[in-house]
Image: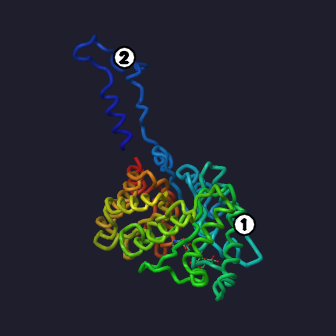
Amino acid sequence: MALALVATATLAACGGDTPTGPKNKSCTEDPTQVKCQPPTDTFPSTLKGMAARTGRYFGASIYAGFRSANSAAYDAILAREFSMLVAGNDMKWDAVQPRRDAYNWFWGDSMVAFALRNGMKMRGHTLTWHNQVPAYIRSQNWSADTARVVLTEHINGVVTHFQGRIYAWDVVNEPIDDSGLLRDTLFARSLGGTAFFETVFRSARAADPAALLFWNDYNLETPGPKQDSTVAWITRLKAAGVPIDGIGLQAHLAITAGGSGAAAQQVYFATLQRFASLGLKIHLTELDVRLPVEGGGTVELQAQNQAWANIIGACRLVSACEAIVVWGVNDGESWLTPGNVRKPLLFTDDLSKKDVYYTVLNALR
Ligand code: G3I
């Protein structure tokens, strides 16, 4: 629609008399005149194209089996719309190192190869997390030394394997709990927070000096104790020379019945500014906007569109915000799928573009 408006306006201005000059030929009389050519500032018609206009990436998370399960049509959408990919599950600890002495690279390698073939950047998700870890991690109570060895072994193994092929790693995922305290996990307990963060970020930097290293978490998009605590931790760690390059704001946004739930653009903007002022790059790493469990009517759908526009609009205003990644392509593959009523993504299950797709495209302009 925006394209049509731009084109119409330009053609209307084309041709006819000027008040003072000699009679110009109209475009119908001479369509080869420069003034009659289509505008050169037309907007791209894909998410990645629109994001690239301002030097940003637009990405998606995908799952194992994406090639066989989802068909050529799905692959074509990935290649057409996205300039960044992330494995939704297949680079997590339980997937890549299911036993201490056994690695599994099949799906990770397959996704990286697909991404690189299609000119996309790859995000690595995630080196450490409290979920999706194998049994040999879950059942332990380690000394600090053992914890450090196991962590370093994992990070060296994984980052070295993918070395040179991952644009940015989520080195830590969700390390702070909802009240703003360091999350009580095996490694944080064994090492203490400072030594845990130092170990993981320094090991990752050593294994692939070119990869950007991110701290990734949810519920950081709006102010509160979790955001304050995260800012305080990162400030301290960076002052001590720990190599943290970026903050990943997962941005799993939710619309509640009646249409509230998401914040105003200024609120997201203030958050992005706050993290940018720490010298961090910002990626919106897992963006989706879900409707209430009971589904949504006109009001909730409007609020959902507005939430997409608000957060992407905020990213557009902060130059450190360099990537926007959606957590899945079509509604049916979302982690929020049961019942498929929450419709948090940009494509329907038959891979048609939803209204929110156009909202996002417009917000990226
Ligand atoms: O692989 C098994 C399969 O063998 C089994 O048949 C099936 C039965 O339920 O489960 C499969 O494992 C599921 C796995 O996804 C792969 O599909 C797990 O049950 C399920 O819990 C797991 O969910 C993932 C979730 O992380 C786990 O916490 C979601 O797909 C994944 O999208 C989600 O991603 C997280 C990010 O990593 C961090 N931020 C939050 C985000 C959403 O929860």
Which residue does the image show at 44% across and 71% down from the upper left?
Answer: 232
Which residue does the image show at 43% across and 74% down from the upper left?
Answer: 229
The residue indicated by pointer 1 is: 105
What amino acid does circle 1 point to? Trp
Along the horizontal axis of the image, is 60 left or right of 205? Answer: left
Mark 2 vs mark 1, CA separation in Å: 63 Å
Q: How many marks?
A: 2
Q: Is mark 1 within 8 Å of ligand 1?
A: no
Residue extending furthest right? 101
Q: Residue 37's quadrant in the figure?
A: top left
Badge 1: residue crowd in 10 Å (few <14, some 14–19, many ≥20): some
Residue 211 drawn at (x, y percent): 62, 57
Residue 7 drawn at (x, y percent): 37, 34
Mark 1: which secondary structure? loop
Residue 235 drawn at (x, y percent): 47, 66
Which of these two is toward me, 138 or 344?
138
The residue indicated by pointer 2 is: 29
Mark 2: which secondary structure? loop
Along the horizontal axis of the image, is 55 left or right of 211? Answer: left
Residue 71 drawn at (x, y percent): 62, 58
Q: Which quarter is ligand 1 in?
A: bottom right
Quadrant that contains the N terminus = top left
Mark 2 or mark 1: name the one nearer the start of the chain. Answer: 2
How was the colour assigned to the protein in this rendering?
rainbow
Which of these two is toward me, 74 or 54?
54
Q: Residue 172's quadrant in the figure?
A: bottom right
What amino acid does circle 2 point to? Glu
Answer above or below: position of 197 versus 363: below
Badge 2: residue crowd in 10 Å (few <14, some 14–19, many ≥20): few
Along the horizontal axis of the image, is 141 left or right of 216? Answer: right
